[in-house]
Amino acid sequence: MGVVLDTVGQWIAGYLQKEVPGYEPFTPSDPEHLRGIIQPGDVLLVEGNNRISGIIKYLTQSTWSHAALYVGPVDGATEADGEQHVLIEANIGEGVTSSALSKYFAYHTRICRPVGLSYEDRTTVCRYAINRIGFGYDTKNIVDLMRFLIPLPIPQRWRRRMIAFGSGDPTKIICSALIAQAFDAVRYPILPKITRAASRKARREILHIRDSSLYMPRDFDISPYFEVVKPTIVQGFDYTALHWADKQKPLQEVAGEFRVFPAVKSPPLVPEEIDQEAPVQVPAEEVKEPAPL
């Protein structure tokens, strides 16, 4: 029976991880800018293109379906071409693994950076995630997988619970849960519940850390404690340097030095003097005397 469950679980996991054909991101990552800006402790959000990505994007009503933690070079983990692994992520069917940054160059991504996180705590967050490499996903727990095959639509109030429901092990459910646990290790907030003290005199806010299994990739994007870092802006952006395929830059004689449109001569503020013409001479024979009354 265990072999059957394991086989069925692996089949479902493979089906959910299969890429959907025809994917084309609106704004793919810029590899050069992305490599130069991302730092240890940053959360990389990915749009994703497999079947489970589409389900997660629907359940979360968000662009982001996957999250990975940037930890810097991982010792002993490289690609076949020698590229160092720098990301820690959790995938259904694979568990917690490391991967190279180039894995997501073809996807729409976003960097979310924890604000004010100290160097020591950043190191702890990264080390926490690295130490979880190898945590597997138990494919025998088919409940965790089959819930993603439930036909849509699903009431909005149940969508977050649909992702959290299952075995209770965050590393076996969704990628963002592992990252949430890593930040929880240093008590860094993501989207905490806030309770206001009843007493006005002792009015204050008490933060309650949510259960890590309830976090989604989009939570790092909307969190007030994470800064959205856009590489193309941070490294300097000059819109005048762009080359448009459908339009050419205006010619110099048309655009001028500083303006897009040619200068137009304004009308004078003081009206010009009106030329007074000489009176018209009328012949005497054409002038008629008025008739007597």
Image: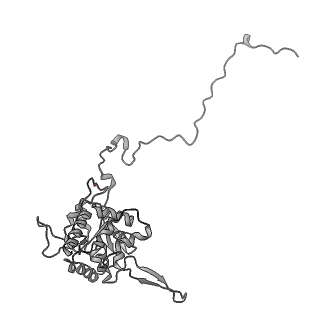
Query: Looking at the image, can residue 231 be seen?
Result: no
**Front residue (pair 258, 282):** 258
Q: Nearer the viewer, residue 201 or 46?
A: 46
Looking at the image, residue 96 lies above or below residue 102? below
Q: Colour scheme used in the picture? A: one colour
In which quadrant of the rendered image does the C terminus lie? top right
Q: Is residue 153 above or below residue 282?
A: below
**Total of numbered circles in the picture?**
0
* Residue 189: % across, % down: 37, 79
Examine the structure image and report whether residue 128 is included in the region drawn in magenta: no
Quadrant for the N terminus in the image = bottom left
Residue positioned 82% across, 15% down in the render: 290
Q: What is the residue that sits farthest to the front in this orientation?
A: 1
Residue 187 place in picture, x, y as percent: 34, 83
Residue 179, quarter of picture: bottom left
| Residue 105 placement, left or right of 156 | left
Q: Main secondary structure of the magenta part?
A: loop
Q: Who's the residue at 31% across and 75% down the image?
A: 177
In the image, 169 versus 268, the foreground residue is 169
Q: Is residue 22 magenta?
A: yes
Measured as percent of width and height from the top left, residue 222 is found at 39, 70
Q: Residue furthest top?
A: 285
- Depth order, front residue of 165/262: 165
Q: Which residues are magenta?
A: 20-24
Residue in view at x 31 percent, y 84 percent:
186
User: Based on the displayed image, in which of its 4 quarters is residue 73 positioned?
Assistant: bottom left
Query: Residue 125, position in %: x, y?
Result: 27, 80
Q: Quadrant of residue 155?
A: bottom left
